[in-house]
Amino acid sequence: MLATSWSELVSRLGYPALVRHGLRHTAFTWMADSGVQLYVLQRVAGHHDPAATARYLYPDHGAVRDAGGAFSAWWDSMGTRSSVQAASRFLVP
């Protein structure tokens, strides 16, 4: 009965392709974007495996781009030579 009621509601609103499970993905993605940690989302979802929860999350492409920009700025501030020299200290011979 609930599925029929949902189908009728979204059809009347003009969103016949909107499915309830898609809203779950959206909610978990928005919670993750707002800073909720994966283990908390896992508990909310009732998943035993964090990988199952991670499948619900869709990356914020702006945040990914910003992270890349932040890393590039840091890398540039280090200078190529000093960065490579600093990193080489951690290489195993």
Image (cartoon, rainbow, N blue to C red):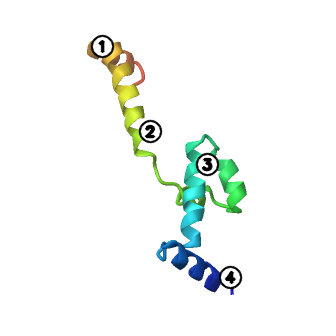
Decide: is 83 above or below 20.
Answer: above
In this view, the residue in front, 21 or 51, is: 21
Residue 3 in the image, given as x and y percentages of width and height: 63, 82
How many neighbours does mark 1 have within 10 angstroms: few (below 14), some (14-19), or many (20 or more)? few
In this view, the residue in front, 29 or 41, is: 29
Mark sitting earlier along the chain (1/4):
4
Mark sitting earlier along the chain (2/4):
4
Q: Mark 1 vs mark 4: give the one in front.
A: 4
> What secondary structure is marked by label 4?
helix
Callouts 1 and 2 close, C-beta under 8 Å: no
In the picture of the structure, the residue carrying the numbered disc 3 is: 31
Amino acid type assigned to the residue bearing label 4 in the image: Leu
Amino acid type assigned to the residue bearing label 3 in the image: Met
Q: In the picture, residue 83 is in which quadrant? A: top left
In this view, the residue in front, 24 or 70, is: 24
In the picture of the structure, the residue carrying the numbered disc 1 is: 79
User: Residue 63, which numbered label?
Assistant: 2
In the picture of the structure, the residue carrying the numbered disc 4 is: 2
> What secondary structure is marked by label 2?
helix
Q: Residue at x 52, y 79 (%)?
A: 11
Callouts 2 and 3 close, C-beta under 8 Å: no
How many neighbours does mark 3 have within 10 angstroms: few (below 14), some (14-19), or many (20 or more)? some
How many neighbours does mark 4 have within 10 angstroms: few (below 14), some (14-19), or many (20 or more)? few
How many neighbours does mark 2 have within 10 angstroms: few (below 14), some (14-19), or many (20 or more)? few
